[in-house]
Image: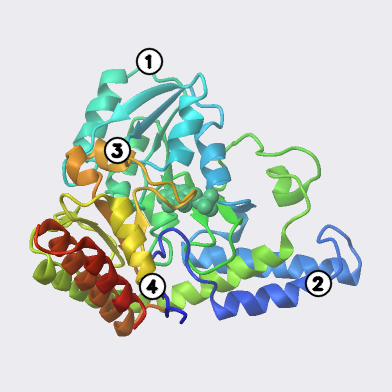
Amino acid sequence: MTVKRTYLDHNASAPLRPEARAAMLAALEVAGNPSSVHAEGRRARAFIEDAREQVAALVNARPSEIVFTSGATEANNWAVTAGWDTVLVAGIEHDSVLAPVAFSTIRTIELGVSPSGAIPADRVAEAVQAGAGRLGRALVSVQLANNETGVLQPVAEIAALARSHGLHVHTDAVQAAGRIAVDFAALGVDLMSLSSHKLGGPKGLGALVIRDGLDLPAALRGGGQERRRRAGTENVAAIAGFGAAAAAAARDLERAPRLRELRDRLETGVARLTPEAVVIGAGAPRLANTSCIALPGTAAATTVIKMDLAGVAIGAGSACSSGKLGVSHVLAAMGVAPTLADAAVRVSLGWNSEERDVSAFLQAWDALRRGLRSNETPAASPARAGQATLMTAGE
Ligand code: PMP
């Protein structure tokens, strides 16, 4: 019997939206190279320019500020290594921000993180003042929302402060775009990274938003594509899919309160079934779709595997790129105790989540809890406990 699947791992990758699929199929039919002047080429170009407008509209940027990339990993790598002498960054950033800086000769200044997961703007002020006059061409990189906890950062405040000291600002808006209103112009940042597959577009496509007028070295050199900023024949179908997903996500922004209700129902259910569970980051402003839950004493890997067997897909640690199950550097940077961090799983809803997904999650969580409890009771047979879980899985 096949188990009906419940997908609650949108922060790792969201299911493809029908609008994105339709746009991609239409674009795949076009033979032309978007750089060619003939009709076929112009048709391919039109897909790209339409998508550029749709992505720009999602984040209130100008179309001329959008450069398509192979994903947010590329956008982040490009942004943080683009000729800076110093990069100021906190330990909660995605690996695609931290690793390229760590593997370069760029001087790094670490920004502190409060236990709630937020980067206090005054810590940035302290760091900037401490380094005053010695930073050279400097960048502050602060994410808008965290992929593991959903915690939001005061990017506008940090950007105003950084710019008043002559620093440039990058924000990784991968998890925020399409989930909260994101305004590139109002945030006052110079650079912003976006990813298509987090908002229901295809995987392997993203964008770096580059403030008009900012002088940034090209990501790739060769042909003159993307205004000479990123050479290479464009992935037209994926770009079209990203554009359609961005337009749909912009339209769906009004669904955020509904997602919050679903998430709150999920967290209330978890608290009722397992009062010992801790929601990490619950005390800070956070995305309406994300819940980082630790069940003390149960390894995240165990929870993820048991929930998976019961038909429910959730994430563990920063599992969004490799499915790895390991210690989360994000939770470590927040000062979460290792025993709690080891137990943390991530539940993330999205554009197609519904009431019944939360019900299925809670049913599986209840079976998990009963299995764990009976494992703890010496009188209970572990085999029977396992059976109970799998029976629920088959329902
Ligand atoms: N930044 C954040 C916050 C992310 O969650 C991810 C995806 N795991 C990335 C960057 C990388 O995005 P992509 O998968 O498009 O390379």
Question: Which mark sits nearer the N-terminus, 1 or 2?
Answer: 2
Q: Marks 1 and 2, Cα distance to the nearest angstrom?
A: 50 Å
* Residue type for callout 3: Leu
In the displayed structure image, the side of residue 338 where residue 104 appears, left or right? right
Q: Name the residue under label 3.
A: 161
Tell me residue 327's x, y (percent): 32, 40
Mark toward the viewer: 1 or 4: 4
Q: Which residue is drawn at 53% across and 31% down?
A: 81
Q: In which quarter of the image is residue 170?
A: top left
Asked which secondary structure carries label 1, the reply is loop
Quadrant location of residue 385?
Answer: bottom left
Alpha carbon separation for disc pair 3 and 2? 44 Å
The mark found on residue 354 in the picture is none
Labels 3 & 4 near each other (Cβ < 8 A): no
* Residue type of the residue flagged with mark 4: Gly
Crowd rating for badge 2 (residues with CA inside 10 Å; few <14, some 14–19, many 20+):
some
Q: What element carries label 4?
A: loop
Q: Earlier in the sequence, mark 4 or mark 2?
A: 2
Using the image, determine if residue 105 lies above or below residue 155.
above
Find disc 4 in the rendering and name its residue. Answer: 311
User: At 59% across and 65% down in the image, what residue appears?
Assistant: 202
Task: Quote the CA–CA distance across marks 4 and 2.
Answer: 43 Å
Q: Are marks 4 and 2 in contact (CB under 8 Å)?
A: no
First along the sequence among labels 3 and 4: 3
Please name the residue that numbered disc 2 is placed on: 43
* Residue of label 1: 134
In the rendered view of the protein, which quadrant contains the C terminus? bottom left
Q: Which amino acid does label 1 sit on?
A: Arg
Q: Is residue 330 left or right of residue 231?
A: left
Which marked residue is nearer to the observer: mark 4 or mark 2?
4
Question: Is label 4 within 8 A of ligand 1 (CB to nearest ligand atom)?
Answer: no
